[in-house]
Amino acid sequence: MRVIVHTGKGGVGKTSISAATALRCAEMGLKTIVISTDTAHSLGDALDKEVGPEPTEIAPNLWAQELDTRYSMERYWGKIQEYLGAFFNREGIAKVNASEVTIIPGLEEGAQLLWINEYFQQGEYDVLIVDAAPTAETIRLLSLPDVTRWWVERLMRIARGLDSVIRPVKKLFSGKKNESGIDIAENAWDQVQLLFDTLDGVRELLTNPEHSSIRLVVNPERMVIRETQRTYTYLNLYDYATDAILVNRIFPDEVKDPYFKIWKERQAKNIEFVSEAFGALPVYKAPLFGEEMGGLEMLRRLADELFGDQNPSERLFDGVVHKVEKLDDEDNWVLRVPIGFAKKEELDLYRSRDEISLSVGPYRRNIVLPDELQSLEITSAKFEDQYLNIKFEKQGEG
């Protein structure tokens, strides 16, 4: 199964592009499901169909689903939460507070990732399209297995150290089974561990470019592009493979009204900036349509503009634009930028606090640095195996 995740700043048209991509895959004969992880669901509006928390058939080969956080939490975490809540309540924590304690940070979002794992394991679909939340939430979602494991390990350590409390709580749940028929009381902690092993498996799936691609949706606006640059760098930091930039809502050539002349000129400059910002990543473009985007016919037109006759489920790029790697346990990092056969005298490197501007002859790249690198100093920049390796180190005070 191919997994394609669309993300970008809020309001850039991720949902319409996700729906259009899914429709194109379905009409090419691929059994496709498109799911929305954004709490502000608009997938049903884009498809002009009623869509719920379980898969809904939209058209031949096409299903859609708007993931509901409460529904997903109950499905994947409900019985374990009930067990943990009883444990904390037994300790004298008020029931309402016990419920809050047992919502592990990030797990609400993580329950959405478990749907991806379920569909991958079932192998029922050829393509899974994810209409993801705005960029900041998506980065948090993709990095949550690391963040959340810290919390749950401490929770488990506390509970396991209080066996005299756990024993009577187990009696309350004696004979209760989860959806898989496993005894909750005897296997609650094993189920928690399995849950996080599954989340780790989802991360492995989403970082495997043979199976998954991240696609960044932008509008031709400088602020949107800058935020998307930062997102792209963070995706590299977590080893997620981005294979395309999708530029949406470009004023078409037929718009001749003088009122839009400055807007069109500014958009043209910003589209050039997209190439500077993302290097060799392929750029796909879609115009601003003269009517509201919604319904299968409009989505078909959008897919035609973006992909033509191309199959959007294929990997659109398999190279590396740049990569951030940690060198050691110290606060030392390297930014690896493929340069090919450029000559040293053609290179010009300029660094502001949060950005590097790299020129090679007449071409320029702008790379927004993640937080981890912004406070560090560049100590070297060397050519190695057709890469420019820029080393960042923490410098001693004074």
Image (cartoon, rainbow, N blue to C red):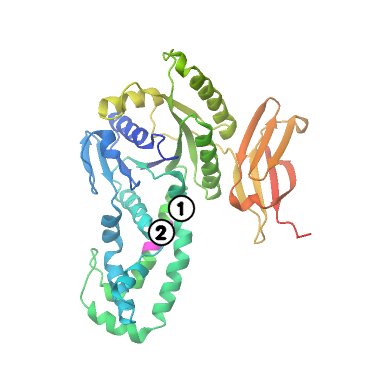
* Dot 2 alpha-carbon crowd within 10 angstroms: few under 14, some 14 to 19, many 20 or more: some
The answer, for residue 153, to whether it is visible in the render is: yes
20 lies above or below 135? above
Q: Which residue occupies 37% across, 52% down?
A: 113
Left or right: where does residue 269 sit relative to residue 85?
A: right
Q: Which residue has dot 1 on it?
A: 140
Say which amino acid is labelled 1.
Arg
Question: Mostly what secondary structure, the magenta segment?
Answer: helix
Per the rendering, the mark at residue 106 is 2
Q: Nearer the viewer, residue 239 or 133?
A: 133
Question: How far apart are labels 1 and 2 at the CA level?
Answer: 8 Å
The picture places residue 356, in percent across and down from the top left corner, at 66, 40
On the rendered image, what quadrant is the C terminus found in? Answer: bottom right
The picture places residue 105, in percent across and down from the top left corner, at 41, 62
Say which amino acid is labelled 2.
Gly
Q: Nearer the viewer, residue 217 or 386?
A: 217
Stretch in magenta: 195-200
**Circle 2 SS class:** loop
| Mark before the other along the chain sequence, 1 or 2 | 2
